Image (cartoon, rainbow, N blue to C red):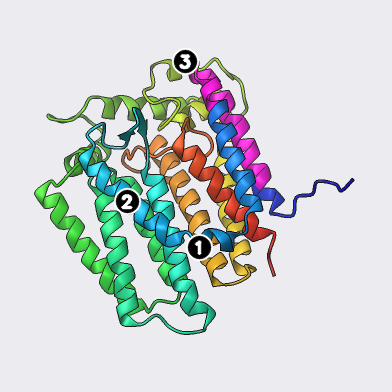
Amino acid sequence: MQKLTFKGDKTILLIVILLSLLSVLMIASAGNRWMEQLRNFGVGFFLLFVFYHIDYRTVSRFATPLLILAGGLLIYSFIDSSGARTVSIMGMDLQIFYFIGFCVLLYMAKFMALKLNSEEELTRNEVLKLFGLILLFCGGIFFSNQSTAIILFCTCIVLLFVGRVKTKYLLTFCGIIFVAVFLAFALNIGRVQTFKNRVIYWKNDKITPGMDKDYGKQAILSRAAISTASWFPAHVGKGTIKKILPEKDNDYVYAVLVEEMGIIVGLFVLFAYLFILFRTMRIARNAEGAFAMLLAWGIGFWFCMQALIHIGVNSFLIPATGQTLPFISRGGVSLAISGAAIGILLNISKREV
């Protein structure tokens, strides 16, 4: 009987498993939804297993249909009014922006790989096409979820840079985006006022007229949870600040984790995400072909940036953005997409040249 062997990056898989175990512990500590989280992890790890075994080149064949689907979901998000960060599909509120972002990265990786594999530079028209794609999807997401739009935009720029797009094109495009964002803030388009209020509170550290009082409550309590934590686990399941901390199992789960598990575990989680990015860079460098290299970069950078923003918000280093912590925060669609993405990354890693 043939032994079951794992040929992918064992370090990334181990980190994901450890983060998942911490997640179940934190969700159980924060409330009574740990069974729901276990179910979500079941879906996530099932997709991880499936995409680990599916050749990533097979996934590339669906890049265009998935991009069309992402466009349809983005349009639907404007029609639906269930919430700023979710849309209602068949009676369920789903966070679709992670899925949309992944579809954009998949399409860009395939589009640029066709040129890189033939050792040709992207033409000016092809670069403009990619710029238009980024502007369309990042701009559409920006109206509802600024932080996810920013993460997607930065990840796309990294892919363009790695894909050898000329620097003058990148600087020009970033300049145009800067002007567009400035106009959006000036005209208070979409949820821009909410974002501005959060920046103002972060800068002044106090509530001003017109702001949601939860801004101050979340920022103060998350900082208190982290600043009063011990170095080692001492209050596992017995945190006191978490009892009144809003979004304690989602946007502010890192603060709860540090309060109960200690600073050492908090630092371990921080460096775990940085190490995933480091391992991803290694996988990308040794990847078999340009598509695998670009897709690995996209997945690794997205995960790390999302985690750093979440931790930065919990530590009050940056304004509140409402980003979850991958594989630790409570989630449904986000965990499913994360599992599929890591599965693809592991599939790429087992085919390193």
Quadrant containing the C terminus is: bottom right
Report which residue position mark 3 lands on: 240
Residue type at mark 3: give it: Thr
Q: Earlier in the sequence, mark 1 or mark 3?
A: 1
Report which residue position mark 2 lands on: 149
* Residue occupying the point 27% across, 30% down: 215
From mark 1 to mark 3, how far is it between C-alphas?
Answer: 50 Å
* Residue occupying the point 62% across, 25% down: 233
Residue type at mark 1: give it: Arg
Left or right of residue 129: residue 36: right
Which quadrant of the view contains residue 209? Answer: top left
- Decide if residue 116 is in sight here: yes
Q: Earlier in the sequence, mark 1 or mark 2?
A: 1
Q: Is residue 28 magenta?
A: yes
Which quadrant of the view contains residue 89? Answer: top left
Residue type at mark 2: give it: Ala
Q: Is residue 18 above or below residue 132?
A: above
Question: Any mark on residue 61, and which?
Answer: 1
Give the residues drawn in magenta, as a range.
13-37
From mark 1 to mark 2, how far is it between C-alphas?
Answer: 25 Å
Q: Which element carries disc 2, helix, strand or loop?
A: helix
- Place of residue 168 in the rendered image (x, y in percent of width and height, measured from the top left): 31, 79
Left or right of residue 118: residue 46: right
